[in-house]
Image: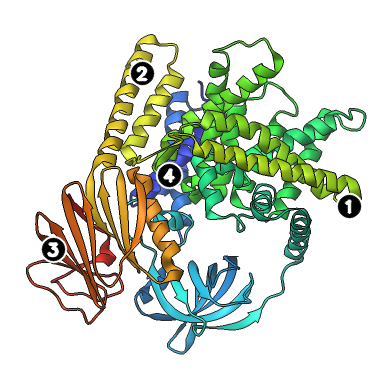
Amino acid sequence: MRFFERPFVFLAALFMLGIVIGDFFAWNWWFSVPIIGLFAWSIFAKVTKKLNSPIFITLFILGFVTCGILSIQTSRNTYTVRQYEDSTATMIVQITELDGVRKQWKRAICEVQAIVDENKLRPHSETILCYINAAGLEVNDRLIIRSPVGKIENRNNPGEFDAQHYWNNKGIYSTTFVGYSDFKLIDKLPTPFYDQWRMKVKNLFLNVFESHLDGDELAIASALVLGDKSLLSQDVRKSFSAAGAMHVLAVSGLHIGIILEMLLFLFGRIPKLFSKNRAILVSLVILWCYAMIIGFPPSVVRATLMFSVLSIGRMNSEQSDSLNILFFSAFLMLLFDPILLYDIGFQLSYLAMFGIFTIYKPIAVLFYIRNKWLRKLWEGTAIGIAAQLVTFPLTLYYFHQFPNYFLLTNIGMMVFAGIVLGLGIILLSLNWIGLFGKIIALVFGFSLAAMLVFVQSIEGMPGSLAEGFVFEPWLILACYLILLTLLFFRKNRKIVTISTISGIFLLIFIQFDRYSRITKSEIVIFNASQLVIAVKDQSATTFFFKAVPSKIEKVKFLGDAYLKTNASHGRFVELQKGITHFNFANKHISFEESWNGVLVTMKPSNKQFYIRTSQQAPYLEKMTNLSMNYLSTTTDAIALKEGAYIIAL
């Protein structure tokens, strides 16, 4: 692949490399000045033909990598508000995003505008994560809050979501909990006309769905068509995740691609009104209006921009290089926001498209099928294989699980996603036509129910979900090195043989590591606000907990995360006052629960440890003392706020 044949593939790759380097290594701005100067001079010299290609390419590579370094370092927010960590800060903030409107504690993304410092306002600009216990708040509200500000940190429990990485890569480093008495509403800024119109249209669409649907069907329709996942139950989320269809519930590239194809098909039936280019332009306008109505979520903006660039690139030529156009759209997005490189959705969507553009055809030609409809089914399956093959290392890294029947799910979703999305859009457009609208709504509801039954059937199949995968970064790099080697050197038999053997050994290592994780036995005391103790005996885990009824869901969420990385079955047992006995594999564990702690005794080893649940609890001698994360501790005890405590059995 020569540089000038696919320039944006190389430019985007160099820019990404610069972003990664800029994040991992300190970089003095003064180093950049001569490099950027030589970079600019090399372009001029190349244009005027005063520079040979090797020197130009070298300077060009250094220059573009340096641009990536500078972009990420200028994009990372300062977070001086954390000087107030573990103390109380008074700040003036404006709410920019608000989630969990149906919950007591609402998650809000807030822009800090000023800090009250020694009876004066000190201007400040930073994004922080707030959890606010208040009703009636809206986006754009300005508040004065007074609460402790802390660093966003992981609790270091096995299997937990990497919240620190997630929020830091959105430029958010600090968090605070604001009680109902810790804030005061300063003023409600008027909602911009655009937001008023957008919410009015979105609520109108939601009302249409609510008038015809309810329960899980309404929740799926709202998520799939309008991008609103707030109504989804945990059971529905779990079913779609286990079947490998979770991406269907988040409006993204799949949905945008389906809508674009439907629009182009529709306009193609009216050639007198819509030429090829006019159909593309009108379709793209409708796509951006759709993205605007659902609030420009990042995944939709990313997908719409990607398909817009691809479509415009093909307006004048059917032979346009899709891969080059794909990297051009990625480069545009990273130029605007370099931190996007670390966004999970960005990584998975672009890798999926990369897989489709590079290995779909080699997979599709493996079998020739004469029947038109069976051939289309195989081609759709080949697209799913190509996307899954390229994204599976990251999928295992982030989600620790792999849907074994993803091919079957992919075939079903090819049918259901198109039908449901198409019927949903038709219903929103033609609901006002009385009987016709009711018929469409009936078919729409039936399709949603059928989709849910299909997903739950996949979930219920034996071995539907393989869990227990924990990937280290080097393992991801090794997987992609092998994949890229097979892709770019597929005509070299010797390299293909070596890469294939390396891939087999890598898969054996991954399975061995997973098997070791599944078959281990251990006790885990979690870093949580509720007492949670997991006793794992190879493939079975029992969670003993002590929590008020309103916190039991959090206990189960913590347990499910642990089970996902350890691939075992779990059950939950609430500790009662007195002694709770548990027998397994010739071992006996007793939990002696009192008002200020839990004494755990293991037999036949007679090992004991004591978990303090109250500040007044004593420190017991001749055993390990653990303190819950909400307690202050001394050097004589292990503080669970530092992370989960694990004992191998």
Residue for badge 2: 500
Query: Residue 645 at x, y = what percent?
Result: 23, 59
Image x and y of residue 479, in percent: 37, 30
Kindly identify the residue that appears in the image at 36 percent across and 34 percent down: 477
- The image quadrant of residue 228 is bottom right
- Side (left or right) of 258 relative to 9: right
Q: Earlier in the sequence, mark 1 or mark 4?
A: 4
Q: CA distance from mark 3 to mark 4?
A: 35 Å
Checking the image for residue 14, the label placed there is none
Tags 2 and 3 touching, CB below 8 Å: no
Reading the image, the residue beneath label 1 is 432
- Disc 4 marks which residue? 399
Above or below, comparing residue 469 to residue 201 in the picture: above
Three-letter amino acid code of the residue under disc 4: Phe
How far apart are labels 1 and 2 at the CA level?
58 Å
- Mark 3 sits on what residue? 608
Q: How is the image coloured?
A: rainbow
Query: Foreground: 283 or 464?
Result: 464
Question: Where in the figure is residue 457, as x and y percent of width and height?
Answer: 55, 37
